[in-house]
Amino acid sequence: MAMYNDKVMDHFMNPHNVGEIQGADGSGTYGSPVCGDMMKIDIKVENDVIKDAKFKTFGCGSAIASSSVATDMIIGLTIDEALAVTNKQIIDELGGLPAIKIHCSVLADHAIKSAIYDYAQKNGKTYKGLEGFD
Ligand code: FES
Ligand code: FES
């Protein structure tokens, strides 16, 4: 496991925000075209602010660590701010990932956007940055 830095290992061994939200305002799943692994993210939204986020992943350590930091990052953000979070910011927050594991972090980024898309659909809202999600 020497390929992972301490922060990645910590989020892998003790991931934050694992689970599901009953009565979630938005749910998104995303499957990686690279490895076939899957991630599900639920969000709770109040007045356009993400109050809670939880994830379940069927993926590797990088996917788990990425979802852990990504959910930490979006809790407390407005939808617009959450949509502006980039995959690179997730990786930077983790202190870097090995090149062959970058695609795993994309799962978190896409699953978040998919959950926000679901929320937007259910509430008749549109946000910039959701083009191509359906
Ligand atoms: Fe394991 Fe991509 S190969 S998550
Ligand atoms: Fe599939 Fe990392 S290899 S999520």
Image (cartoon, grey):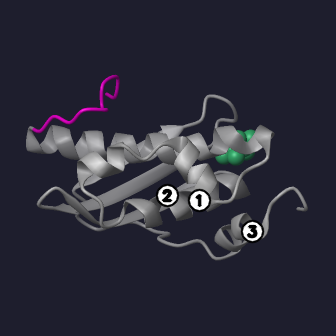
Q: Residue 77 sits in which quadrant?
A: bottom left
Q: CA distance from mark 2 to mark 1?
A: 9 Å
Q: Are marks 2 and 1 in contact (CB under 8 Å)?
A: yes
Residue at the extreme bottom of the image, as rendered: 14
Circle 1 crowding by C-alpha within 10 Å: few under 14, some 14–19, many from 20: some
In terms of secondary structure, where does tag 2 sit?
helix
Q: Position of residue 31 (x, y in %)?
A: 54, 37
Q: Position of residue 134 (x, y in %)?
A: 31, 28
The number of numbered discs placed on residues in the rendered structure image is 3
Which residue is label 1 attached to?
A: 93
Task: Name the amino acid, label 3.
Answer: Met
Q: Position of residue 67 (x, y in %)?
A: 54, 57
Q: Position of residue 27 (x, y in %)?
A: 33, 50
Which residue is label 2 attached to?
A: 70
- The segment highlighted magenta reads 125-134
Sequence-earlier tag: 3 or 2: 3
